[in-house]
Image (tube, coloured by chain):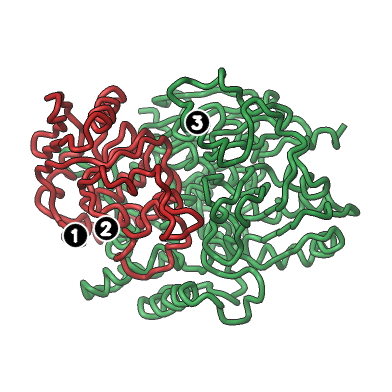
Amino acid sequence: MSKSINRITSTAVPVNIENVDTDQIIPARFLKATSRDGFGKNLFRDWRYENDDEAKPKAGFPLNDARFKGNILVAAKNFGCGSSREHAAWAIKDAGFDVVVSSFFADIFKNNALNNFLLPVTVSDAFLQEIFVAIENDPNSEFQVDLPSQTISIAATGASEQFDINPYKKTCLLNGYDDIDFLLSITEDIKKFEAQNA
Amino acid sequence: MAKTLFEKIWDRHVVKTIEGGPAVLYIDKHLIHEVTSPQAFAGLNKRGIKVFRPQQVVATADHNVPTLNQHLPIKEELSRLQVEALKKNCAEHGIELYGLGHPFQGIVHVIGPELGFTQPGMTIVCGDSHTSTHGAFGSIAFGIGTSEVEMVMATQCLLQSKPKLMRINIDGELKAGVVSKDIVLYILAQISASGATGYAVEFAGSAIRALSMEGRMTICNMSIEMGARCGMIAPDQTTFDYMEGRKFAPQGEEWNKKLAYWKTLVSDEAAVFDKEYHFKAADIEPMITYGTNPGMGIGVSGHVPALNEIDEKEKPSFEKSLEYMGLQPGAAIKGKKVDYVFIGSCTNSRIEDLRMVASFVKGKQKAGHVEVWVVPGSKQVEKQAIEEGIDKIFEAAGFQLRQPGCSACLGMNEDKIPAGKYCISTSNRNFEGRQGPNARTFLASPLTAALAAITGEVGDVREHYN
């Protein structure tokens, strides 16, 4: 797993479905593992295979379509709603994605993604449509996600848009810092807080 | 300055604020279970550190447990290993575990409140999105991912950005046969499954005040289905009466001191919310979902939206959803045959839910073709149900009273709904495959589920109250 993100230029895989919940990203029956590895092969399991059978991929699903590849996943609005399972972020990252683009992310998923160096990029509805159209016109269409300048651009049209990210989180992603390292570094402040509020 | 309930609690828990970034928020209580904790413990072990405040953590096994023969070893190997890992991790880190067989075992969001672990004014987290349930006591309670579970274990803190604030008011009296589950499904149908994303939601108004704690928990439980960061209800006499005497509730002088503080936990009159909704309780009818997200709900006397009622952009998702459910646009929902009835989950498995179902089905028989599972939320709920003779009522009706756990809510343990079958469920999610691959879920209240168990189809409970 890459532990920092800076600039990514890649083709993208489109999942043009709204309200993709984390049960679709990784169904509960695959949450029995005690490690963080290996969830990628079950990403979108029930949308990908007929009757849970890997020998029967569903033809229409983009992850089964050889035309679509790259490390950017593009999805319609309200991506990652439902369960708090971080396994959803692990599965996407493990399947080789570093960026997820949508017009709207569910809260818990967004935090989980950021904690796993999977960059959630929120774009306007209109820009999201432009991305889907670009992929439809040419699956080899490239996109650039530039974290330092917080921009995402479509190579084919030259269109670009700025995206928001919390400055603290941006620093973490650029440098590979974990929240937990930061929190452990302020243990004395936490103890002082506890003493004052006992 | 006037403050909301949320702000009063939030402000007291900020350890420090990072310049231009999130706040370091102190967490009072941490609930853990077998599914989302093993990787967090592994993280601590890798760093060679112990849980920072083990006495502020409570663990139980709920998601992965069978609901029959709990005295036997868990058959499914991976489930068993996960439950065993929890036991080992809790022992190594000095955490109290209410595991299988323990008289306090149960669904994490049922046992927290019933043990008095959940209290007003607290910050409470758990690696489970339905942690919002605990907000019913006037606390800030929210679900977190496993990396965050590790952070709380390591430091009892999280980095959090302050959400926007929303208040949803429900005023007036509910009609007979309409219960708290219908209120929350109604709100979801009004504001959608993403209508509260980015917000902390306070539920208020006379219809909310009139609810029991169980009813309030059902509403806060499903606030995550609107996308809310958390849901909360200001504590009042109903809250204090529920809490007094519970195992971990404060006692004696400490109780009085806490009570005085808890009574200050209300949104000030002049407090400002970023968004506010007002609904009338009288407009709410028994609700049911027809689609594959909890915002796709209608009154039971209504019909599935027709295609011309759906926004052009939403049509592909809507049609995908109906295809999965095997329903037609514009179709009536009443009279739709069901195969399974599931009464349980952290939404509706408390003693009041079981009593509600029992009083409705007493002396009646389930429909021949229907399988009915009633899964109590905890060992204590199960015990209480047996003491009250509710088990006998269910047995006579042909219902199966099973043992505590998350059961058929999430298609993870042995309890799954077969492909293509319809289940009317008191749980919280009707996502594709949620109750098992290709299972079809109708979300409804315990009363509407009980009626379906008896008649074998979706019906209107109000007809039985007139």
Labels 2 and 3 in the same subunit: no
- Report the front residue among B300 and B254: B300
Q: Which chain: green?
A: B
* Furthest-right residue in this view: B363
Secondary structure under tag 3 reads loop
Alpha-carbon neighbours of circle 1 within 10 Å: few (<14), some, or many (≥20)?
few
Tell me whether the residue at label 1 lies in contact with that at label 2, contact meaning CB atoms closer than 8 angstroms: yes
Percent across and percent down for residue B446 are: 71, 47
Percent across and percent down for residue A86 are: 35, 55
Q: Write down the quadrant of residue A195 in the picture.
A: bottom left
Percent across and percent down for residue B89 are: 38, 76
Which chain contains the residue that carries disc 3? B
Q: Is residue B74 left or right of residue B338?
A: left
In the rendered image, which residue does mark 1 sit on? A1
- Report the front residue among A19 and B27: A19
Q: Is residue A40 left or right of residue A12?
A: right
Q: Earlier in the sequence, mark 1 or mark 2?
A: 1
Q: Would you place residue B356 above or below residue B279 in this image?
A: below
Q: Which three-letter amino acid code belongs to the residue tagged 2?
A: Asp
Q: Which three-letter amino acid code belongs to the residue tagged 3?
A: Ser
Q: Write down the quadrant of residue B390 in the picture.
A: bottom right
Judged by depth in the image, the label closer to the viewer, 2 or 3, is 2
Secondary structure under tag 1 reads loop
Which circle marks residue B192 in the picture?
3
Q: Which chain: red?
A: A
At x 15%, y 30%, the residue is: A153
Which circle marks residue A94 in the picture?
2
At x 53%, y 51%, the residue is: B433
Judged by depth in the image, the label closer to the viewer, 3 or 1, is 1
- Report the front residue among A109 and A168: A109
At x 50%, y 31%, the residue is: B192
